[in-house]
Image (cartoon, rainbow, N blue to C red):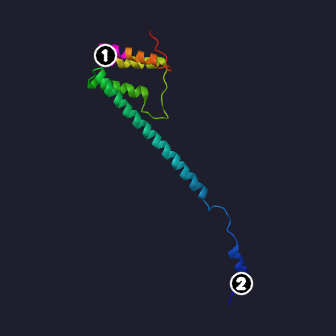
Amino acid sequence: MNRPPRYRRKTWRKKAPLRPARGTGLQIASILVAMAAGCLLWLHLYTTGKAKQTMRRTLDQMRVEYHLDEQQLARISGLEWEFHGSGNPFTRPSHTIGEVRQHELAISAVMNSEDAARFLSETEEKAKDDPLKPPPVHH
């Protein structure tokens, strides 16, 4: 029986070093970055979609409640997008009480007088009911 030389027998018994292959750390890091980017993209698309849906629902309610025509609705839609933004969670605008009041007055200016008065009184009532938002200051 022919045996392989002794030095070969020892080499096949040796354990391989327990370190990952070259470039594995970079691959893992790139996978983690891609997963984080995917999560952020999903969050952005989800919140902007929800904002569009909420805006559409709000404008439909305003159309019925305040008897708005298409031109008024388009102007109010522009005001709402300008004030509230696109729904992007990374660029959410924050507003002072004065800015909120100016926004409400700008919306009421688009409506006819009776509906505008009712809209302003309803927004003041909502402000009184909301404990986090103090009522608007009248000038």
Quadrant in the picture for residue 104? top left
Query: Residue at image x 51%, y 48%?
Result: 35
| Label 1 or label 2, whichever comes before in sequence order | 2
Q: Range of the magenta residues? A: 109-120
Relative to 137, say whether 61 is above or below.
below
Q: Secondary structure at mark 2?
A: loop
Q: Can the viewer see residue 72 in this picture?
A: no
Question: Badge 2 is on which residue?
Answer: 5
Disc 2 crowd rating (10 Å Cα; few below 14, some 14-19, many 20+) is few
Query: Residue at image x 50%, y 19%?
Result: 131
Q: Is residue 28 magenta?
A: no
Q: Is residue 117 magenta?
A: yes
Query: Residue at image x 37%, y 24%?
Result: 79
Q: Residue furthest top?
A: 139
Query: What type is the residue that disc 2 sits on?
Result: Pro
Query: What type is the residue that disc 1 sits on?
Result: Asp
Q: Residue furthest bottom?
A: 1
Relative to 70, say whether 120 is above or below.
above
Question: Badge 1 is on which residue?
Answer: 115
As rendered, which of 88 and 134 lies closer to the eye? 134
Observer-side mark, 1 or 2, equals: 1
Q: Secondary structure at mark 1?
A: helix
Distance of mark 1 from mark 2, alpha carbons?
100 Å
Quadrant in the picture for residue 82? top left
Position of residue 69 measured from the top left corner of the image (x, y, whole percent) = 26, 23
Query: Residue at image x 38%, y 14%?
Result: 121
In the image, 7: left or right of 31?
A: right
Position of residue 122 measured from the top left corner of the image (x, y, whole percent) = 38, 16
Quadrant for the N terminus, please: bottom right
In the image, 9: left or right of 118?
A: right
